[in-house]
Amino acid sequence: MSIQRTLSIIKPDATRRNLIGKINAKIEDAGLSIIAQKMLCVTQAQAKAFYQVHAERSFYEDLCNNMVKGPIVAQVLEGEDAIHLYRTIMGATNPSNAEPGTIRHDFGESIDLNSVHGSDAPETAAQEISFFFSLIELCK
Ligand code: CMP
């Protein structure tokens, strides 16, 4: 295991319900450090580019539409085994399958409105972090 960085997004369904603080508490309680964070509204084109990997999936249009419904919070998390650790505390993609105490179980409304996104591997983490942040914005 090693110190890693991963990209987290607190999605519009969660910012709309004032859940940023509660989600950040779960992140920090798990031992992850938030080393960069910003709130922004993405355009449809930006959402489509970010989720390009899912372009052929039936849920792609809905996914991109949901990402432009309000502000998001993009974050870089750092810590030991951060990519796997964050996916563990996020819980399963579908909140109905997520373990109690995970972010998606406690706050997610549905598979489409599942409150958070986290990178799934070191290569995607690097790509996704650079999508939202420049080197000078990382506070370490
Ligand atoms: P996220 O981790 O942001 O990655 C892609 C998103 O697509 C996912 O969370 C879900 O919100 C959404 N999605 C909708 N349907 C599905 C599905 N069947 N499988 C995976 N992701 C889905």
Image (cartoon, grey):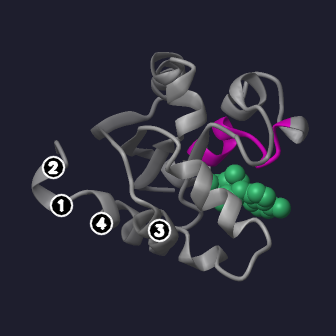
Q: Which residue is mark 4?
A: 130
Depth check, mark 3 against mark 4: the one in front is 3
Query: Can you tell me which quadrant of the image ligand 1 is in?
Result: bottom right
Q: Are marks 4 and 2 in contact (CB under 8 Å)?
A: no
Q: Which residues are magenta?
A: 86-95
Q: Report how far apart the C-alphas of labels 2 and 1 lie in the structure.
A: 6 Å
Q: Which residue is mark 1?
A: 134
Q: Is residue 90 magenta?
A: yes
Taking the spot 44% from the left edge, 34% from the top edge, the residue there is 32
- Residue that protrudes farthest toward the bottom in the picture: 56
Q: Which residue is mark 2?
A: 137
- Label whose residue precedes the other's in the sequence (3 or 2): 3
- Label whose residue precedes the other's in the sequence (4 or 2): 4
Q: Report how far apart the C-alphas of labels 3 and 4 lie in the structure.
A: 11 Å
29 relative to 88, above or below: above
Q: Which residue is mark 3?
A: 50
- Residue that protrudes farthest toward the right in the picture: 97
Q: Is residue 50 magenta?
A: no
Quarter of the image with the C terminus in it: top left
Q: Point out residue 136 in the picture as x, y percentages from the top left corner.
A: 9, 54
Q: Report how far apart the C-alphas of labels 3 and 2 lie in the structure.
A: 19 Å
- Label whose residue precedes the other's in the sequence (3 or 1): 3
83 relative to 126, above or below: above
Q: Are marks 4 and 1 in contact (CB under 8 Å)?
A: yes
Q: Report how far apart the C-alphas of labels 4 and 2 lie in the structure.
A: 10 Å
